[in-house]
Amino acid sequence: MEPRPKGRNSRLERSIARAVRRRRIFPYLAGATFVLALLAGLVMTIIDEKDFPNFGLAVWWAIVTLATVGYGDVVPTTVLGRIVGSAVIILGVTFLAFLTATVTSYFVSSDQKQAKERELADREAADEELHELLKRLEKRLSAIESKLD
């Protein structure tokens, strides 16, 4: 498969890249999780009608499974249902890991920004203090030079 030339990315790819740059990935993760829950629910109603007789119950199971809660009130018993369930579990853990990393990254970058702002303010205050000291020294030096003349 040939790589796409630059400038021909899809609108979705561009908006995801922009979201990552701006650290606004949470809505995409939440949306992807919601869509995945709907798809998993739909698949389960199709392949395991006995355990998932309606779409609402299947979506409930998918949300509980994706969130890694696993109440156990509804479980797949067919082989195909368990395979889909395993995939949903893995995707749920992956999405939670990404979500945790995103939130953690936000807090860390926020703390780093505040630390940089404090450091800059401290540096500016120290520079101002040094500037005032240099002015006083310059005046003393001028006074000494005038006395020597």
Image (spheres, rainbow, N blue to C red):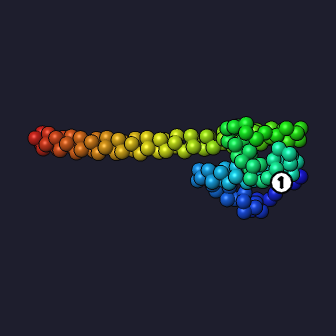
Q: Is residue 91 visible?
A: no
Dividing the picture into quarters, in which one does residue 116 lie? top left
Residue occupied by mark 1? 3
Mark 1 element type? loop
Q: Is residue 42 above or below residue 104?
A: below
Image mark count: 1
Q: Quadrant of residue 73?
A: top right
Q: Residue at x 74, y 53 (%)?
A: 56
What residue is shown at x 62% (from left), y 50% (from top)?
26
Q: Nearer the viewer, residue 46 or 85?
A: 46
Q: Is residue 103 left or right of 84 when viewed as pictured?
A: left
**53, 108: nearer the viewer:** 53
What percent of the width, then of the height, locates residue 124? 34, 45
Quadrant of the image containing the C terminus: top left
Q: Residue at x 76, y 60 (%)?
A: 9
Image x and y of residue 106, in percent? 54, 45
Residue 88 visible, this orientation: yes
Q: Amino acid at mark 1?
A: Pro
Q: Position of residue 30 (x, y in %)?
A: 65, 51
Name the residue nearer the viewer: 143 or 120. 120
The spot of residue 146 in percent (x, y) is 12, 44
**Structural crowding at the residue carrying mark 1, measured as other residues with C-alpha within 10 Å and reported as few (<14), some (14–19) or many (≥20):** few
Which residue appears at 85% of the width and 38% of the height?
77
